[in-house]
Image: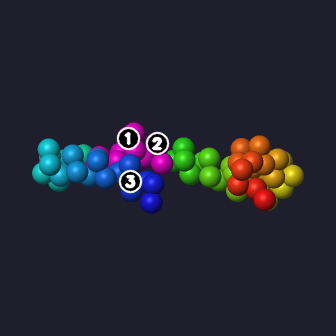
């Protein structure tokens, strides 16, 4: 959902300025941005499965008010 939120302005500008033709508006910055976000998520999932104590410590210190 967040990727779509960041993509919306690119789609809007691409449709308005270029009439929907031309180069891919996602080919550069947006694609790299999304790939970095996916890499971060994959690292977080790996940490959860491979190092559960480290993950719990990270979450506890990052979100102390949300942990009961």
Q: Residue at x 76, y 56 (%)?
A: 67
In the rendered structure, are the residues bearing label 1 and label 3 in contact, judged by CB atoms less than 8 Å apart?
A: no
Q: Point out residue 18 in the picture as x, y percentages from the top left corner.
A: 14, 46
Horizontal relation, residue 61 to residue 40: left or right: right
Q: CA distance from mark 1 to mark 3?
A: 17 Å
Q: CA distance from mark 3 to mark 2?
A: 15 Å
Q: Which residue has dot 1 on it? A: 28
In the rendered structure, are the residues bearing label 2 and label 1 in contact, judged by CB atoms less than 8 Å apart?
A: yes
- In the rendered image, the quadrant that contains the N terminus is bottom left
Q: Is residue 28 magenta?
A: yes
Q: Which residue has dot 3 on it? A: 5
Neighbor class of circle 2 (other Cα within 10 Å; few <14, some 14-19, many 20+) is few
Q: Residue at x 39, y 39 (%)?
A: 29
**Residue 40, which numbered label?**
none
Q: Please say whether residue 51 is visible from this viewpoint.
A: no
Q: Point out residue 52 in the picture as x, y percentages from the top left corner.
A: 84, 55
Q: Which residue has dot 2 on it? A: 32
Q: Which stretch is magenta?
A: 24-34
Q: CA distance from mark 2 to mark 1?
A: 6 Å
Q: Residue at x 72, y 50 (%)?
A: 65
SS of the residue at dot 1? loop
């Amino acid at each position: 959902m967040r990727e779509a939120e960041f993509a919306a302005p690119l789609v809007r500008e691409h449709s308005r300025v270029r009439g929907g033709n031309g180069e891919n508006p996602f080919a550069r910055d947006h694609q790299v941005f999304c790939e970095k976000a996916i890499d971060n998520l994959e690292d977080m999932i790996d940490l959860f499965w491979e190092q559960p104590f480290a993950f719990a410590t990270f979450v506890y210190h990052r979100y102390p008010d949300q942990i009961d």
